[in-house]
Image (spheres, grey):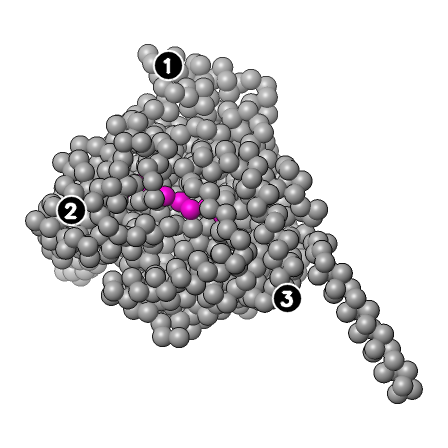
Amino acid sequence: MKLSALLATAVVATLSFTSVSTAQAQFTPKRPLEIAVHAGPGSGNDVFARALITVIDKNKLSPVRIQVANKPGGGSTTAAAYLASKAGNENTLGVFTNIWITDPLVSAEATNPLTSMTPVALVIREPGLIAVKADSPYKTLQDFIDAAKAAPGKLSQSGGSVLARENVLRQLLMGATGADWQFISFPSGGERLSALLGGHVNMMIVEPGEATSQVRSGAMRVIAAVADKRLPGFPDVPTLQEAGFNIPNLPQIRGIVAPPGTPKEVVAYYSDMIRKATETQEWKDYVAENGFEPAFTTPEETLKFITEYTEQLRGILEKAGIKLVAR
Amino acid sequence: MDIINGLAHGFGIALVPQNLLWCFVGCFLGTVVGILPGLGPAATIAILMPLTLNMDPAGGIIMLTGIYYGAKYGGSTTSILLNMPGESSSVVSCIDGYQMARNGRAGAALGIAAIASFIAGTVGIVLLTLVAPAVARFALSFSAPEYFALMAFGLSLVVLLSGASLLKGLLALLVGLWLSTIGIDLFSAQSRFTFGRSELLGGLDFVVIAIGVFAIAEILTTIQHRQEGTLIPVPKGFRNLLPSREELKASRFAFVNGSFTGFIIGVLPGAGSAIASFIAYGIEKAVSKRKEMFGKGAPEGLAAPEGANNADTGGALVPLLTLGIPGGGTTAILLSALVLWGIRPGPLMITESPDIFWGLVASMYVGNVVLLLLNLPLVPLFAQLLRVPTWILFPVIFGLSIIGAYSVSERIFDVELLAAFGLLGFLMAKTGFPSAPLILGFVLGDAMERALRQSLMMSQGDLTTFFQRPISLVLLIAAVVILLLPLVSWFNRARVRAISEGA
């Protein structure tokens, strides 16, 4: 009896070992793939995930159906916790952005840092444009900085959370120039934009897609690009470096992660699928239309990027006087 | 002339059979989504958006917008019948709508809601057609101090929502204000009152609180009184299911009030339709000659907020279409849909995409008629629902409430919160605390705090900023006047008593 039980265990163990080793050779998902998104339907991330799924479906890059799981709440916290709870599950991925890095730095409740997940790929970077109202006296970023220096604390910038890239860039610019202006938080993009167009704040950082029609209709002027090189739609707008401001172009990123401890072959499979998707014409069109920059990276490069970027942001936030969580 | 030509062109597009069909589909889906608590128009539009990308842009945007305003129509149904607000915009409709149903006027209430929605919805679109550019400039002139004053004005309405005891109303309001501060603070990125629970980082959801303190509390109260049989009397005969002439007459001013209040507040990005309906209700009660009827089933107390949340739709499309600025969640999704079709809403939209602009505007006139025709025949049908005995109806309401709370973000934690708020609402009802001020505080608290902090940051801590700006000053004075109203009536009563005692 004992022997046969032992034998059975051995057989089962061997069988499962062989099945694991074949899976190692080539993993393919058997069940529908779920992509967790940290915001509600229609948010930037949600649209990004659905666009990616549409491209994958159209080009038949996935043998299984892919669906979006919206996990809003607490910035990225709910989605990160959800993804962490899926450890060992090979059918779940998540879309991460900068706030997956910053949230765990500042909030004690956010206990699942991006560094604990399994990186798969960076997919896009989003450049930004520094914009002022069309009839404002500031023709260049230097004009704005000079005015802010002349009257410390008088000028203001509209933006989202203090953790958002907009505020981090403001901190870097203020640190480099000695100027000082206010950062006024608004929960939605619409309110930030109407605060600028109504003349209630002096400056904001917008997405290229958002700026195009405002600039063309003569409501807005863009004075600098937060990007490594000039943006295709705005060839006359200098980058921060060209304008004489030597600060890092903090990228706004969107990428894909898997739950903690996901096996290498599974990561390799999804990395490959995303690479193929980003090489299609449909995806290139989507990226160009929205003024994004393609930024595909391998899992190893993604891990390196996340580790370094986390440390960089920690340093900047600390300097900006934002209370960080000791971990 | 441009407007007439444009509109004529628009009707040419909206009345193409194919687009007419999409308009109907959108309105129908919107009505269904509005009736179901939890699932909102924003989520529905986002889910359907990928399907519409292969459609003709005009047809697609006509359908998606139909969902948006259709949901406002449907939202009142559960408010009136079950005291269960399906969307934040229909919470005020519970106050008098549900009382009308309890008085046996469920059919009339549904009818008034449909008529108010139709009138105000149409007025909203007429205003969108005629005055959009000018009104959009007005919206931009609103800065943080004006928003603060508007919210303060809204909060002062607690006086009108409190019922017997103003003190209890104010206490409930404070609890609502406190609840609105739970979660991550936008300005400092620090969490407040989360008690170490990551579920609370995102703050509490409106639907969970409103269904708890309204629907669940109502059931618990009724069960305690051991009412047998049917909950609410439903009169026999088709005639009794429609609003009476007196009820319509009483709602005359409410139709106008709801239309304009809803439109003006809808135009402001960052205000929202819940605020529009609260303020319309407040104005209605403040000017009414029979204030004592409010909260007991006054038809005008239903018509004003129900009108306002529909006129709000027309208003919310003004900054979206003329400035490219989305005022709220649903309009932000409509914006991303338009962008995916390669259309950029903004000042150039009318000249560059006249087909879409005028086609959409014209389709909304059509859609409002469709919704009226769709909703009126449903009135008797829905009113019959109340004939269902309580032993069936209550479990169904419980089930719907739980599904509604769960579907907000698909987690059991919200269902637990729902139970807690149901209990809170029940205890409040037992001890004579009104629940409407709690909801008012929760709806306005967050936006009011933000506006206050934004104002003070912009003025570098100078409080006089609120009194130097005309719109803000007027709104603050109005708020003070409303707050002093009870004092005046108390004074009057004392005087009358003195006179009668003297005589």
Q: Say what secondary structure mark 1 lies in.
A: helix
| Same chain assignment for discs 2 and 1 | no
Question: Marks 3 and 1, how far apart in space?
Answer: 63 Å
User: Does the magenta segment cover residue A126?
Assistant: yes
Measured from the top left, where is residue A121 in percent x and y? 52, 53
Sooner in the amino-acid sequence: mark 2 or mark 3: 3
Residue nearest the observer in this picture, B318 or A190: A190
Instruction: Identify which residue is drawn at 25% across, 27% down.
Output: A218
Spatial CA span between label 2 and label 1: 48 Å
Q: Label 2 sits on what residue type? A: Ile
The residue beneath circle 1 is B4
Nearer mark to the viewer, of 2 and 1:
2
Q: Is residue A245 visible?
A: yes
- Asked if disc 3 and disc 1 are in contact, CB closer than 8 Å, the reply is no
The subunit letter for the residue under badge 1 reads: B
Disc 2 from disc 3: Cα separation: 51 Å
Image coordinates for residue A234, horizontal then vertical, percent: 32, 32
Report which residue position mark 3 lands on.
Answer: A88
- Give the residue number, with chain letter if any, for mark 2: A145
Seen from the viewer's position, the closer of residues B141 and B280 is B141
Q: Is residue B27 left or right of residue B153?
A: right
Looking at the picture, which amino acid does disc 1 mark? Ile
In this view of the protein, which residue sits in the foreground, B209 or B142? B142
Q: Are marks 2 and 3 on the same chain?
A: yes
Span of residues in magenta: A123-130
Give how far across and how far down residue A153 sits, in percent: 13, 53
* Dot in front, 3 or 1: 3
Q: Is residue A106 magenta?
A: no
Element class at badge 3: loop
Left of A119 or right of it: where is B185? left
